Image (tube, rainbow, N blue to C red):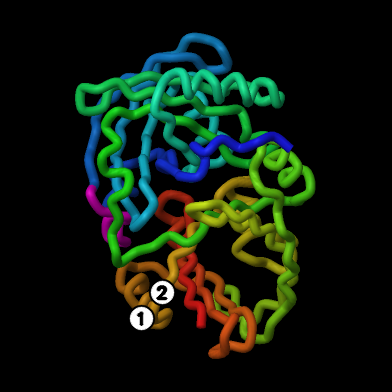
């Protein structure tokens, strides 16, 4: 297995692509997106699949607790990785991005990845606060189910800031099978998936009705966030299968722990969201148990929030 560079210990941001940023922004500000900055008509130049490209975007950056988010609406009709993603998947998280400090560090990682058989999908340079920002996006999505990215950003002073009221515990893609996906990431130096089997429970609900669901979860332990890879059946109807039908494989939800699950659900309901699926693990109320509820925030940007409480 390849040795993983230290730069991957910290997630700098996720790149979240949307088709109507004016609609999605207020929805996530209400949920808790903070320190929001707006950037209009940003121009990026670079290469897409090795060919020159120029991209114009409307963007916001902000924080959801310990997770930095860059939300991008690309101009329509341009040939680039952003519009290709939106045409295939709709709104959603396109990339998980890690920071490099120098162009040499970025070049070295590009060479390492190429040596492992992974090419560059898109490279871009733009300006943020009058300083150049460089992105490299690797072509990992076909086998790894999301794009792995690098950023060199001189203006990274806020990357460690955090809203103490919100913590993202995990990022969760939904995939159709795990063996090849785990092997792909392991080849690049990332941890292998630890597969656990979730068995049906009488307290599981889908749209308020009993849900008798067996599925697998591939836990991938990282320094900052854990990744939880969900491998569901298509029947009976469930939130994970819904995602596959609507968006194909990719990042379906982010996990937000709640001290009081009922109160957290009530807060989301006041914003117009509802519990789409709920369940539990362990002997509820005892150590190593917990409860969770998926809110239908995917109606605003394609990503669900999983509220969870562990005892």
Task: Give the class, few, some or many, for how many residues have Cα within 10 Å of label 2's Cα (few <14, many ≥20).
Answer: many
Look at the image and tell me in which quarter the N terminus lies: top right
* Residue wearing tag 1: 263
At 60% from the left and 52% from the top, the residue drawn is: 173
What residue is shown with label 2? 258
In the current view of this chain or complex, which residue is farthest to the top? 52
| Residue at the image position 59 percent from the left and 50 percent from the top | 246
Q: Residue 18: x percent and y percent?
A: 41, 40
Residue 94 visible to the viewer:
no
Specify start and end residues of the magenta stretch as a single range: 27-35
Where residue 262 sits: x, y (%)? 41, 82
Residue at 50 percent of width and 73 percent of height = 293
Q: Check disc 2 and report its element: helix, strand or loop.
A: loop
Give the number of the mark in front: 2 or 1. Answer: 2
For marks 2 and 1, the one nearer the N-term is 2
Q: What residue lies at 57% left-to-right and 89% top-to-bottom?
A: 286
Q: Under tag 1, what secondary structure? A: helix
Q: Position of residue 239 (x, y in %)?
A: 60, 63
């Amino acid at each position: 297995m390849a040795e993983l560079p230290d730069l991957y210990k910290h997630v700098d941001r996720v790149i979240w692509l949307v088709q109507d940023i004016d609609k999605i922004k207020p929805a996530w500000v209400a949920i808790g997106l903070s320190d929001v900055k707006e950037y209009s008509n940003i121009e990026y130049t670079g290469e897409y699949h090795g060919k020159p490209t120029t991209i114009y975007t409307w963007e916001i950056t902000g924080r959801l607790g310990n997770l930095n988010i860059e939300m991008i609406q690309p101009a329509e009709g341009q040939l680039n990785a952003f519009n290709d993603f939106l045409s295939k998947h709709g709104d959603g998280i396109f990339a998980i991005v890690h920071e490099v400090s120098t162009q040499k560090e970025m070049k070295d990682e590009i060479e390492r990845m190429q040596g492992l058989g992974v090419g560059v999908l898109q490279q871009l340079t733009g300006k943020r606060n009058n300083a150049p920002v460089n992105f490299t996006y690797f072509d990992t999505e076909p086998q790894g189910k999301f794009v792995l990215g690098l950023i060199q950003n001189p203006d990274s002073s806020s990357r460690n800031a955090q809203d103490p009221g919100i913590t993202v515990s995990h990022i969760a893609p939904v995939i159709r099978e795990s063996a090849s996906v785990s092997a792909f990431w392991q080849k690049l130096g990332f941890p292998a998936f630890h597969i656990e089997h979730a068995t049906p429970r009488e307290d599981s609900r889908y749209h308020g009705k009993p849900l008798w669901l067996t599925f697998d979860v591939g836990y991938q332990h990282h320094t900052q966030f854990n990744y939880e890879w969900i491998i569901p059946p298509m029947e009976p109807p469930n939130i994970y299968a819904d995602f596959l039908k609507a968006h194909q494989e990719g990042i379906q939800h982010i996990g937000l722990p709640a001290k009081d699950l009922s109160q957290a659900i009530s807060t989301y309901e006041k914003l117009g969201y509802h519990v789409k699926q709920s369940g539990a693990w362990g002997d509820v109320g005892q150590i190593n148990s917990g409860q969770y509820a998926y809110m239908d925030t995917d109606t605003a940007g394609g990503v669900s929030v999983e509220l969870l409480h562990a005892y």
